[in-house]
């Protein structure tokens, strides 16, 4: 329990000539005005202003700030007027108390507007007199410390506001100690179950490791003395909130928490900080990637320190922060430390780089009228690792740095993401790969024909977008395989006169599914479609007697394009099926009229090869994946065929070949020829309608005098399946 005398003692410790009369007067006035009021905890109300004043004294602020701490609630909660305060305590105190009171007074309804308004007022207060914000932070800190006495709904609202507004402001002002405590208290109320679980887990580990904090601390102290370094060593368990955020970031289970100890060494000068770091790394193995030099590169809020994490002998990691006394003061108190000895108004007019960001914000807030936009522009500065973007309608979305319009599209809606073809950023068309920047206004362009591709996974940074793309790709591939598998099995069943649909209806397949270890029929279809299971192997179980497979009449229907990205050929159809995903094998480009064979490629559909294609021999090694195919019709589609012509190297022979081809109304797409040792070869790429057409061409070229051989050329590749 804080007594008024404790505050006086505290102030005297850093400012012996302080104005004791002012504080006396403020205390007596506050006590009288709040008389009879009680807090939710049942304590007299005065306990609250006393605590707030004490927190301000711990920040080593001037007596005006401390008087304001004592008086900060009299305008809000008593009948006192601003004029009375002016008369009794002067303009400064009256303005400051008024400023503190105004910050939490809302004229708006929505949460965004309230938050925006709080921020706006805090900003303006910072510009006119920073002490308003410091008192407000002290006020919020004590309220958070005593939050458990409020009803749950109020508790959650205050905790959330603390996490979203007050802690970030404390952080931006470099007030590390208050920021950590605010966050930790807010966390306890926002996630009570997680916090308890984490606390228990850490306590269990501490119980096992015994007096580990003391042991490491005395080892460090002894080592410093040994090396003639003048420094103080502090050890503690990290705050539950900081442990929790780290666990979440690394997706580690609460039970697996290991990184919960932190030590601090405070030295007399910078040279010693680096010396300490060297000593520690000689004793214990440092964890790679965890060494940070914020002395050479201070944080935007002027925080300076060396950080490292090392592993103790029993595998226990711990973090060590090393800094000078001055840096330590700044790290704990931030802006309050900068200003503590200055008299009078403490504001942003000061020509201090501290306030550059603040002045910028104040300029913005004059330009931005929409509270949501204003909030977000503020957050840009309070959380510098995020990028804030806007929809043309003014909705705001935050992304990690490096995000692209694709991340943005998936954030709006999964379907918008799936069909995203590009974006307009600030009115300009940009490709999907573009990195989005703070303040960008993004308009997503979609097309119904667009769908995700594998490359997209590398173009996004948000886990949401990545997950949605993966999911689409997997589902899509599975759908196709199920479709193909079902058709293959039904076709096979028909050949053996097995009534497949009836079997399905009677659940006669359960035994088969169990044998393959598959939960559902679709999984069996998928495996058949992927080529993992042969359709015949499945169907044969149900063949009653020695039936020869039937050669059923083929249902002639056009093949639909269901496999657009491999280019289903409309000119072919697979014997006995419709809707089958077929594609012409690139190695041989089979021609209508010639004998063809189909081969199931995993996840790709049915590849159609010329029966004379050399690759087929390799592929057909796996007979289960072979299926019969035939041409659907003989339409006038043109196919590109390569011919290799061997001939004597005599004048005009190539011209005759070309004119022969041209006379047969056949287009030459490409031609290449060379000659060596009296022999010449030519390679012609021709547009051919069908096999008969090709045979006529080959015969005609072969009849030319001097032509030795004409052969169709195949591109032999390594067979892929
Ligand atoms: Mn208060």
Image (cartoon, grey):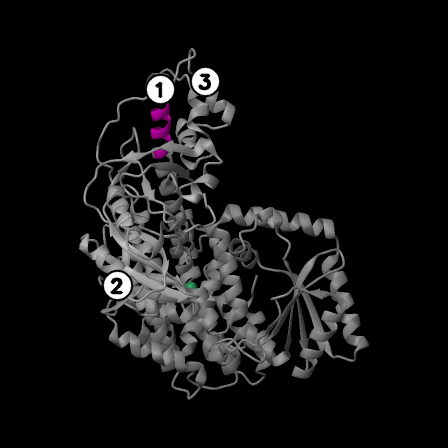
Q: Write down the residue under mark 3.
A: 541
Q: Nearer the viewer, residue 418 or 362?
A: 418
Q: Write down the residue under mark 2.
A: 655
Q: Which numbered disc, 2 or 1, marks the residue that appears first in the sequence?
A: 1
Quarter containing the C terminus: top left
Marks 2/1: CA–CA distance: 60 Å
- Vertical position of residue 357 compared to residue 453: above or below: below
Residue 486 inside the magenta-drawn segment: yes
Marks 3/2: CA–CA distance: 62 Å
Residue 336 spot, x, y in % from top left: 50, 77
Residue 437 shown left or right of residue 139 in the figure: left
Q: Nearer the viewer, residue 121 or 656?
A: 656
Q: Residue furthest right?
A: 226
Residue 470 inside the magenta-drawn segment: no
Element type where label 3 sits in the image? loop
| Residue 659 in view here | yes
Q: Nearer the viewer, residue 280 or 670?
A: 670
Residue 551 spot, x, y in % from top left: 32, 22
Q: Write down the residue under mark 1.
A: 500
């Amino acid at each position: 329990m804080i007594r008024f005398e404790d505050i006086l003692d505290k102030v005297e410790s850093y400012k012996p000539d302080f104005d004791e009369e002012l504080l006396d007067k403020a205390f007596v006035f506050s006590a009288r005005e709040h008389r009879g009021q009680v807090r939710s905890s049942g304590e007299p109300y005065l306990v609250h202003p006393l605590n707030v004043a004490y927190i301000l004294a711990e920040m080593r602020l001037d007596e005006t700030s401390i008087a304001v701490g004592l008086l900060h609630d009299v305008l809000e909660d008593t009948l006192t007027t601003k004029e009375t305060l002016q008369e009794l305590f002067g303009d400064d105190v009256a303005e400051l108390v008024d400023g503190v009171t105004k910050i939490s007074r809302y004229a708006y309804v929505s949460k965004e507007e309230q938050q925006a308004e709080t921020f706006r007022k805090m900003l303006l207060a910072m510009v006119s007199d920073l002490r308003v914000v410091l008192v407000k932070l002290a006020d919020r800190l004590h309220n958070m410390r005593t939050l458990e006495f409020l009803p749950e709904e109020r508790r959650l609202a205050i905790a959330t506001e603390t996490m979203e507004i007050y802690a970030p402001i404390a952080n931006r002002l470099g007030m590390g100690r208050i920021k950590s405590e605010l966050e930790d208290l807010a966390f306890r109320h926002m996630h009570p179950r997680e916090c308890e679980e984490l606390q228990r887990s850490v306590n269990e580990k501490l119980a096992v490791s015994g007096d580990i904090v003391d042991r490491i601390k005395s080892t460090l102290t002894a080592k410093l003395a040994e090396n003639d370094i003048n420094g103080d060593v502090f050890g503690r368990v990290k705050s539950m909130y900081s442990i929790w955020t780290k666990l979440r970031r690394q997706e580690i289970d609460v039970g697996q928490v290991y990184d919960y100890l932190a030590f601090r060494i405070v030295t007399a000068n910078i040279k010693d900080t680096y010396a300490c770091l060297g000593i520690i790394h000689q004793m214990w193995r440092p964890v790679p990637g965890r060494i940070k030099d914020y002395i050479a590169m201070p944080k935007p809020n002027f925080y300076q320190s060396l950080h490292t994490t090392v592993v103790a002998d029993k595998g226990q990691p711990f973090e060590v922060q090393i800094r000078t006394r001055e840096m330590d003061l700044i790290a704990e108190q931030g802006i309050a430390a900068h200003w503590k000895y200055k008299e009078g108004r403490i504001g942003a007019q000061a020509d201090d780089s501290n306030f550059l960001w603040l002045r910028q914000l104040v300029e913005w807030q004059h330009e931005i009228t929409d509270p949501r936009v204003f909030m977000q522009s503020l957050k840009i500065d309070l959380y510098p690792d995020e990028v804030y973007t806007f929809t043309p309608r003014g909705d705001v979305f935050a992304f990690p740095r490096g995000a692209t319009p694709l991340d943005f599209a998936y954030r709006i809606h999964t379907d918008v993401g799936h069909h995203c073809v590009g974006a307009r950023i600030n009115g300009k068309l940009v490709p999907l790969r573009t990195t989005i920047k703070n303040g960008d206004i993004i308009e997503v362009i979609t097309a119904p024909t667009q769908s995700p591709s594998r490359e997209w996974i590398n173009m996004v940074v948000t886990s949401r977008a990545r997950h949605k793309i993966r999911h689409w790709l997997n589902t899509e591939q599975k759908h196709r395989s199920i479709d193909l598998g079902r058709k293959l099995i039904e076709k096979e069943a028909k050949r053996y006169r097995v009534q497949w649909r009836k079997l399905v209806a009677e659940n006669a397949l359960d035994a088969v599914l169990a044998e393959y270890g598959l939960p559902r029929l679709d999984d069996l279809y998928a495996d058949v479609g992927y080529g993992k299971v042969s359709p015949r192997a499945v169907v044969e179980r149900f063949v009653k007697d020695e039936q020869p497979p039937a050669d059923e009449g083929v249902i002639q229907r056009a093949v639909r394009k269901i496999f657009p990205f491999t280019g289903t050929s409309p000119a072919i159809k697979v014997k006995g099926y419709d809707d089958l995903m077929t594609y012409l094998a690139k190695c041989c480009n089979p021609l209508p009229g010639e004998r063809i064979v189909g081969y199931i490629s995993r996840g790709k559909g049915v590849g159609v090869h010329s029966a004379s294609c050399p690759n087929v021999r390799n592929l057909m090694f796996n007979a289960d994946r072979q299926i019969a195919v035939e041409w659907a019709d003989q339409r006038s589609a043109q196919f590109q065929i390569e011919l290799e012509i061997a001939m004597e190297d005599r004048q005009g022979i190539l011209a005759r070949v070309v004119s022969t081809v041209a006379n047969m109304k056949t287009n030459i797409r490409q031609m290449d020829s060379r000659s060596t040792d009296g022999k010449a070869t030519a390679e012609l790429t021709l547009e051919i309608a069908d096999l008969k057409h090709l045979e006529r061409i080959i015969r005609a070229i072969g009849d030319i005098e001097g032509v030795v051989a004409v052969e169709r050329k195949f591109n032999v590749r390594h067979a892929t399946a």
